[in-house]
Image: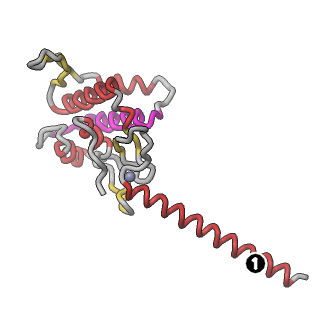
Amino acid sequence: MVPRAAPGELERVRRFLNTAEHKDGRKTIPDRLRSRREAEIWLPKLELLPAGTELTKSEVQRIRKLREVLAALVLEARPADASFLDTLREIAEGARFRLVFGADGRPWMRAVGTGLDLAVASLLRIFLEAKHNGRWSRFKVCGACHRVFYDYAQNRSTKWCTPLCGDQVRSRKYLRRRREKEERIRREEEAARFREEHR
Ligand SMILES: [Zn+2]
């Protein structure tokens, strides 16, 4: 079951974040950016790079780092140390933007550049906008499959990316409780037998 898309451009960030390893039912979906080859296939699929772009090893490391940092910002698990900020600054270096104006005079920022610099700038621009309009805080990590999803609920109370994930967790909990109960009964019976035999 595929989670609902995030609104507008945020969907690109959501799909980018979900290139990290996660679960789909019982299947484990591997990290899509674990090698140069895979990053060269997957980043164009996410419309972050033109098809056929070749990446260097350090570029793959940079995009992986960006994913890690953005994921930490979703979880609000920002480490307290200053190295987190340093990492962000390091990644953002080379990302360029231009202020442009729409037909109605509305200003916005456009990511410019080529290759991976453009991909990084685009993701950072979407992040910045979402931070400003409050949408970033609607991103959550599903408690069952670890995918990032967008919480549309008014009170922001959604815990699972799809109802299926919620069902899975509930049935896992139910099975665990049942196993625990059976185990307890078995032990009680054993103890009773032991007392009986040693009376
Ligand atoms: Zn899920």
Q: Is residue 71 magenta?
A: yes
Q: Residue at x 85, y 79 (%)?
A: 195
Q: Secondary structure at mark 1?
A: helix
Report the quarter where the C terminus lies: bottom right
Q: Amino acid at mark 1?
A: Glu
Q: Which residue is mark 1?
A: 190
For mark 1, does the 10 Å Cα neighbourhood hold few (<14), some (14 to 19), or many (20 or more) residues? few
Q: Tell me the residue at 44%/37% (across/down).
A: 75
Residue at image coords 28%, 28%:
124
Residue at horizontal 31 percent and vertical 50 percent from the top = 3
Pinpoint residue 27: horizontal percent, then vertical percent: 36, 61
**Pick the front one: 6 or 13:** 6
Query: Which contiguous range is marked in magenta?
Result: 54-77
26 to 5, vertically: above or below: below
| 173 sits left or right of 6 in the view | right
Quadrant location, the N terminus: bottom left
> For the stretch drawn in magenta, what is the main secondary structure?
helix
- Quadrant in the rendering for residue 132: top left
Question: Percent position (x, y) of residue 57?
Answer: 26, 38
